[in-house]
Amino acid sequence: MHDVAFEKVTKKFGKVVAVNNISFQVNKGELFTLLGPSGCGKTTTLRLIAGLEIPQSGNIYIKGKNVEKLFPKDRNIGMVFQNYALFPHMNVFDNIAYPLKIRKQPQKEIIHKVTEIAKNLQTEELLSRKPNQISGGQQQRVALGRAMVQEPNVFLFDEPLSNLDAKLRTEARSFLKHIQKEMKTTAIYVTHDQKEAMAISDRIAILDKGVIMQVGTPKEVYKNPENVFVAGFIGDPPTNLLNCSIKYNQNKTVLDFLQFKLDISPIRDLVREKVNNEEAIIFGIRPEDITVEYKNASPNSIKGEVFVVERLGPETIIHVKIGNLIIIVRDFSEPDITMGDTIWLKIDFNSVHIYKKEDGKIII
Ligand SMILES: Nc1ncnc2c1ncn2[C@@H]1O[C@H](COP(=O)(O)OP(=O)(O)OP(=O)(O)O)[C@@H](O)[C@H]1O
Ligand SMILES: [Mg+2]
């Protein structure tokens, strides 16, 4: 049994299809992330789980039970939003206690639970302060505490860290992951930040325009993006996606890319099986799967010009201009190069993916 399951769910607002026939399952104790650009339907999906929106079609299950007829208050969901939505006139204690108070739980139990959670979230010394007397990161913990106190079936997090600065955000995200794993409560986390999604998730569903493009572990979606959307969305910098074609000459198989004819021997047999001669394809290669040669051209390399160099400490990101195209490369050798230099790129053909031109779906 899954803790949350969507079965062909569609939600429209007038003519806008916010969520388009999506199905996915979230396992017990999992931290499952909905990732995608603005407007792709992430918040709508969470609101459907919480019962704040009603789908036009499809079924939603929580703990194996179809929740169609359940009101939001009966779904026992703990939600944390981007703006925390703390009550400004209540102190931290009362904010965390709120879900228990409206359920009319005994005062003694409320005190016990709130103190316990405040200890867990390292906010004990803040209990008597108002939200405007604590930092953004602390407010975020209080909002988490308020969601935890009711011991929900599922946590729903809608970009809960986006109001925090970069340093606090990475701290808060590891804290949140730790707490979630400790509590073993299933969580659905929404973000448009692929790095955050990769860092925090057990599995990720990547959405585009209300459609799920892929579901997988961070490693799976990184190593094997099933379509050009995922390849271009995951990774920083993302996959280089190049329009080219495959040509079969007598006994050679080459990748026809701009003026280059690259020998693709390592994947020749696979390509011959799946790609037609002269078929237009999109060729995907990660920035770290390209080696840079700084001095000489070796056979089967692509000549380019250094366009931009970003030195990020342990790694250097190089934007290389080839004709009118830019290919991005990741290099760990601290190269001594500058704009305008000529360099050569060598592709590791064992690490490439090939996508269909017309629909962007993976072939290899
Ligand atoms: N109440 C509503 N009325 C009309 N259209 C809506 C409503 N809520 C959402 N939409 C539309 O549905 C689509 C999905 O919206 P949603 O809020 O789910 O996106 P999102 O992925 O959460 O985006 P963001 O990252 O910007 O928060 C958008 O096109 C949005 O404009
Ligand atoms: Mg949203």
Image (tube, rainbow, N blue to C red):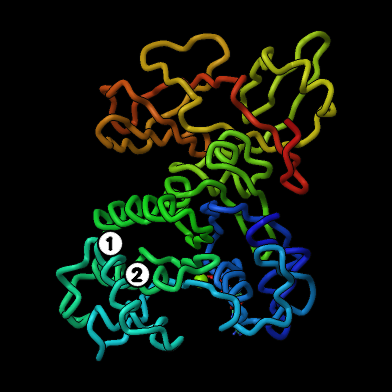
Viewed as shown, does residue 275 lie left or right of 353? right
Is residue 188 shown to the viewer in this render? yes
Q: Position of residue 236 (x, y in %)?
A: 44, 43
**Point 37% across, 17% down: residue:** 294
Between 211 and 138, the one lying in front of the other is 138
Asked where in the image residue 262 lies, by quadrant, the reply is top right
Amino acid type at mark 1? Leu
Q: Position of residue 81 (x, y in %)?
A: 42, 73
**Point 25% across, 57% down: residue:** 168
Pointer 1: what residue? 121
Give the residue at the far bottom of this rendering: 89
**Please, what secondary structure does the residue beneath circle 2 have?**
helix
Q: Earlier in the sequence, mark 2 or mark 1?
A: 1
Pointer 2: what residue? 145
Amino acid type at mark 2? Gly
Between 86 and 161, the one lying in front of the other is 86
Pick the quarter of the image with the C terminus.
Answer: top right
